[in-house]
Image (cartoon, coloured by chain):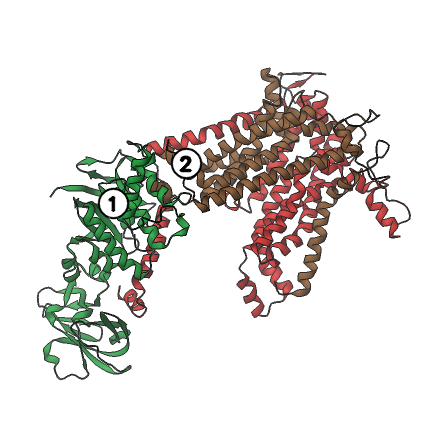
Chain colours: A brown, B green, C red
């Protein structure tokens, strides 16, 4: 199959088209974010190239009829929430996957229970949590109900990543540590954890970005203080302006910087493992 | 001598399969035991049960008379060197050896200078004095083996379990490591249990050789007895140095196998296995005049294989059966046989071993 | 007994081979060996407890609560725990709401078809035609990169694409293919389908490409040597082997599309109401009981779809 030159180039061309289809919206919002302001609308053609809408986001433009995006506090909330979610779901995912290294009764049940968190539609998770919270008289907050909902979503991802990591993990190094008189707890800290660290990092990346951009679960669960995606959703119903595209470009750049941090940490940990530095930390 | 480690009726099943079947064995202090067995004989399982990585389904393991049933692996003080060496890939050679001293539950060594001294001393013992700073991927297979050994030895275990320790090394290195192991062992005086699937290794290393077969102890004795007087046909087979003929003997000193009748000692009757060692066979051109000198079989020469101290000749006997003949070149001269020619392979009936079922 | 001896006699590799075999079987035994001691069992329980409790308490209980509340009595701005089927009757007797159910299923089926049709050739190219593993990963990552843009903003970007004065119309007019701008591109089911396809197609490509990349090339060569044509090879070997990937992809896409409401809210101008949109509007007007009814119906639809798809694959094995 691989040596059919015509088929091959046809499929390659198609894949190119396919990828441009995936990128089209991003390109469009990239272009339109440089629309002239404040009179330029969120459509083609570009009246005049400008960075007006970027300045608008940071409040550097004179007041106009276009209200500034309500993102300041929402951004802080989203970042804090993503961080909390990241830590919790990575810990839960690692623990649960660690338990799965041993066969136990009911493992199928637990597996599907955890995976359910990524299967159940967000809107239902949010609705259910809101109903429970209302009924118990708990007020819905981004750091309470929404946090809980986010972990429901990201924990399964962390779990699956760690499960895959443990599947390839050579347990004989742990046994070696035990036979040297090291307790299982310390063995986990000193041997297992350093070796699964790349997986932990990937779980963290997953959890952070999924939570940062999470919308359907947050909608009912967050209460009065909005997270970033909720703030953006709020602008849907009214007229949209190119400032939202400028903001889209900025959040994308932010996402890429997280990806870059992940890449750096990853290569560092890989290199550390390879170089096998002498650690002189005698506790 | 007292038993340092004793296994009593240890049974272990995996699913429906029995890995160990009521196995009992006692190891004495400062003894080197080779555990020989084919794949699936349960030898690695046995080792893992002693180490505490598996729990026996029944039976007990006693260390210096104390039951280990409730003692987890990390409190047994039994060293374990696994076949893949299982070095900590994120630590240097030095740190690998220091790991146990530094992190063990019982009296961890916190003094940097003392730690360094002990580790360096151990690295010296295994001949890795200069490689402490290397990463585990920057050393050769033989060096990895030494690191694994040093890491275990430095913890001062009462017993060291070696799970096919030389299996991952090439033949040349394997011979050198054998010498090395013996030297280290003499210097330290620890009990070693060495699991192997290789009969040469088992015979060369062990003060005693235990042969495991289908989860049971088939024989345990000194290497010489195992080699010269295997207790069963199966043990003879694992030794990989016997030509074996299936057939029956009717108590008249004649063993009937397909295509040949062979003489044997006249006691015993019934279906059985007739075994004759590779190096007990004499080859003469067929038909031989001197058939009276012993018993024998007619076979076609196929090929030979030279391996330094000895040469092995391969023949095809009755029923397409391949027979091996070994000449030890220190007291025999190699002979030229021509491929396809018929030869008479003979031996003394006393040298043959017959096992009845 | 003698047979094994014979086969090894000429190779002299007997003992080495036996060693290698023993490694394999002993390792298999090791894998099997997960029989727990009581302390190991309690460790397992301790490790499992937090995650399991989290899922039970915050996912299973709320879902059950939703079922329960769907039978509560709906007052104008509040609900009372008096059991009734009033909200259920309201759902099925209302043409609007029942239509939303049908529309949800329709959009789901269409998006399933479009993601499959658009995604399969790409997966075929990545999984079968790119031999280099690194390059494979690079192209897959290239497909995932758009996900690093905010989901909502990405959806919104279709408006200037498909609108009356949007990019598509401008390009088509410039090319002389149309004289009047096409108006039905935006704020219709079409735009919703386009938006969803763009977002979810990657979830179809990934699993299929993965399955395809595992096909042994010698299998295809063997078929070719036997004189099978490209189409026949595809139909009898490649496609059947990629099916588990298609099913896993379908599960991903179904799960996400069925619960959707943001894309339809952003791209349909509130004309295309899916079950998700109805839940949002009902909650917005504090009709909790009614929202719960819609939620239960959506759950039921999901359950049927997932259960049907799971009949074809074991998720635990594929993930």
Answer with left or right where residue B316 lies relative to residue C214: left
Q: Position of residue C179 (x, y in %)?
A: 91, 48
- Viewer-closest of A121 and C125: C125
Q: Secondary structure at mark 2?
A: loop
Viewer-side label of 1, 2: 1
- Residue B13: x %, y % from top left: 30, 45
Label 1 to label 2, Cα distance in Å? Answer: 35 Å
**Mark 1 surroundings within 10 Å by alpha-carbon count, few (fewer than 14), some (14 through 19), many (20 or more):** many
- Residue A120, can we see it? no
* Residue B296 visible somewhere in the drawing: yes
Instruction: Please indicate whether residue C52 sits to the left or right of residue A142 in the image.
Output: left
Residue nearest the observer in this picture, B43 or C274? B43
Where residue A122 is drawn, which disc sits there? none
Query: Which residue is disc 1 drawn over?
Result: B160
Vertical arrangement, residue B323 with respect to residue C285, above or below: below
Looking at the image, is A114 positioned above or below residue A129?
Answer: below
Q: Which residue is mark 2?
A: A105
Q: Quadrant of the C terminus of chain A?
A: top left
Count of marks overlaid on the render: 2
As drawn, A88 above or below A160:
above
- What residue is rendered at 79% in x and 33% in y? A53
Q: Is residue C50 left or right of residue B194?
A: right
Task: Quarter of the image for the N terminus of chain A: give it.
Answer: bottom right
Pick out the residue farthest to the right.
C179
Tags 1 and 2 both on a single chain: no
**Chain of the residue under label 2:** A
* Place of residue C208 in the rendered image (x, y in percent of width and height, measured from the top left): 60, 50
Q: Position of residue C80 (x, y in %)?
A: 64, 15
Element marked by disc 1: strand
Task: Classify mark 2: residues with Cα within 10 Å, few (<14), some (14-19) or many (20+).
Answer: few
Q: Nearer the viewer, residue C204 or C10?
A: C10
Chain containing mark 1: B
């Amino acid at each position: 199959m691989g040596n059919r030159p015509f088929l091959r180039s046809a499929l390659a061309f198609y894949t190119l088209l396919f990828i441009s289809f995936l990128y089209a919206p991003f390109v469009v919002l990239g272009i339109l974010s440089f629309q002239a302001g404040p009179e330029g609308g969120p459509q083609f053609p570009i009246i005049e190239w400008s960075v007006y809408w970027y300045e608008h986001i940071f409040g550097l433009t004179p007041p106009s009829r276009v209200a500034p995006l309500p993102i300041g506090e929402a951004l802080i909330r989203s970042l804090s929430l993503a961080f909390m979610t990241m830590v919790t779901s990575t810990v839960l995912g690692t623990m649960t996957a660690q338990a799965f290294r041993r066969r136990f009764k009911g493992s199928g049940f637990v597996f599907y229970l955890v995976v359910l968190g990524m299967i159940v539609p967000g809107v239902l998770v949010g609705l259910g949590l809101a109903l429970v919270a209302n009924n118990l008289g708990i007020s819905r907050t981004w750091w309470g109900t929404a946090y809980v909902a986010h972990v429901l979503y990201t924990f399964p991802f962390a779990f699956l990543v760690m499960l895959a990591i443990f599947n390839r993990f050579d347990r004989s190094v742990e046994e070696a540590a035990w036979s040297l008189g090291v307790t299982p707890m310390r063995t986990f800290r000193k041997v297992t954890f350093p070796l699964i660290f790349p997986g932990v990092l990937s779980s963290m990346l997953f959890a952070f970005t999924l939570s940062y951009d999470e919308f359907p679960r947050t909608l009912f669960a967050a209460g009065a203080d909005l997270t970033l995606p909720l703030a953006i959703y709020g602008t849907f119903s009214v007229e949209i302006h190119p400032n939202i595209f400028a903001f889209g470009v900025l959040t994308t750049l932010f996402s890429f910087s997280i990806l870059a941090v992940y890449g750096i940490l990853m290569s560092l940990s890989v290199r550390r493992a390879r170089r096998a530095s002498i650690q002189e930390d005698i506790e | 001598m007292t038993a340092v480690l004793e296994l009593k009726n240890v049974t272990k099943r995996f699913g429906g399969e029995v890995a160990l079947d009521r196995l009992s064995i006692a190891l004495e202090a400062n003894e080197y035991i080779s555990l020989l067995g084919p794949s699936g004989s349960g030898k690695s399982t046995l080792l893992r049960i002693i180490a505490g990585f598996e729990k026996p389904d029944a039976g007990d393991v006693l260390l210096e008379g104390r039951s280990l049933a409730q003692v987890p692996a990390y409190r047994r003080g039994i060293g374990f060197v696994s076949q893949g060496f299982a070095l900590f890939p994120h630590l240097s050679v030095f740190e690998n050896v220091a790991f146990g001293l530094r992190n063990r539950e019982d009296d961890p060594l916190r003094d940097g200078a003392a730690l360094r001294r002990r580790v360096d001393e151990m690295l010296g013992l295994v001949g890795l004095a200069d490689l402490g700073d290397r990463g585990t991927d920057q050393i050769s297979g033989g060096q990895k083996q030494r690191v694994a050994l040093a890491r275990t030895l430095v913890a001062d275990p009462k017993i060291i379990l070696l799970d096919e320790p030389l299996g991952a090394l090439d033949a040349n290195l394997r011979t050198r490591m054998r010498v090395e192991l013996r030297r280290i062992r003499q210097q330290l005086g620890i009990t070693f249990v060495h699991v192997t699937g290789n009969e040469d290794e088992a015979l060369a290393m062990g003060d005693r050789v235990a042969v495991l077969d289908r989860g049971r102890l088939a024989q345990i004795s000194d290497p010489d007895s195992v080699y010269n007087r295997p207790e069963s046909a199966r043990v003879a087979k694992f030794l990989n140095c016997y030509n074996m003929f299936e057939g029956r003997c009717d108590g008249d000193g004649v063993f009937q196998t397909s295509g040949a009748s062979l003489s044997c000692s006249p006691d015993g009757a019934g279906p059985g296995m007739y075994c004759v060692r590779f190096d007990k066979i004499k080859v003469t051109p067929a038909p031989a005049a001197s058939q009276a000198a012993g018993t024998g079989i007619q076979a076609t020469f196929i090929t030979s294989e030279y391996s330094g101290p000895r040469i092995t000749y391969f023949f095809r006997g009755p029923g397409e059966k391949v027979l091996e003949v070994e000449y030890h070149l220190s007291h025999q001269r190699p002979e030229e046989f021509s491929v396809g020619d018929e030869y008479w392979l003979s031996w003394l009936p006393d040298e043959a071993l017959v096992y009845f079922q | 007994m003698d047979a094994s001896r014979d086969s090894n006699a000429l190779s002299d590799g007997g003992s080495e081979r036996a060693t290698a075999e023993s490694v394999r079987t002993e390792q298999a035994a090791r894998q099997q060996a997960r029989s727990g001691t009581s302390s190991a069992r309690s460790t397992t329980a301790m490790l499992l407890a937090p995650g399991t409790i989290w899922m039970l308490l915050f996912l299973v209980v709320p879902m059950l609560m939703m079922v329960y509340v769907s039978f509560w009595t709906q007052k104008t701005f509040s609900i009372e725990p008096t059991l009734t089927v009033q909200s259920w009757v309201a759902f099925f007797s209302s043409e609007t709401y029942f239509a939303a159910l049908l529309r949800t299923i329709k959009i789901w089926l269409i998006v399933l078809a479009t993601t499959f049709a658009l995604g399969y050739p790409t997966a075929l190219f990545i999984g079968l035609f790119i031999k280099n593993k690194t390059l494979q990963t690079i192209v897959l990552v290239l497909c995932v990169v758009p996900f690093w843009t905010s989901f909502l903003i990405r959806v919104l970007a279709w408006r200037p694409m498909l609108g009356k004065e949007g990019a598509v119309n401008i390009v088509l007019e410039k090319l002389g293919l149309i004289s009047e701008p096409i108006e039905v591109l935006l704020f219709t089911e079409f735009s919703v389908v386009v938006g969803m396809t763009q977002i979810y197609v990657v979830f179809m490509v990934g699993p299929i490409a993965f399955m395809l990349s595992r096909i042994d090339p010698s299998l295809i060569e063997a078929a070719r040597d036997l004189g099978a044509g490209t189409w026949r090879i595809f139909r009898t070997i490649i496609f059947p082997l990629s099916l588990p990937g298609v099913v896993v992809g379908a599960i991903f896409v179904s799960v996400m599309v069925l619960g959707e409401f943001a894309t339809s809210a952003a791209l349909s101008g509130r004309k295309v109401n899916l079950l998700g949109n109805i839940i949002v509007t009902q909650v917005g007007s504090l009709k909790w009981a009614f929202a719960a009814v819609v939620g239960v119906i959506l759950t039921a639809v999901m359950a049927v779809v997932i259960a049907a798809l799971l009949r074809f694959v074991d998720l635990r094995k594929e993930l």
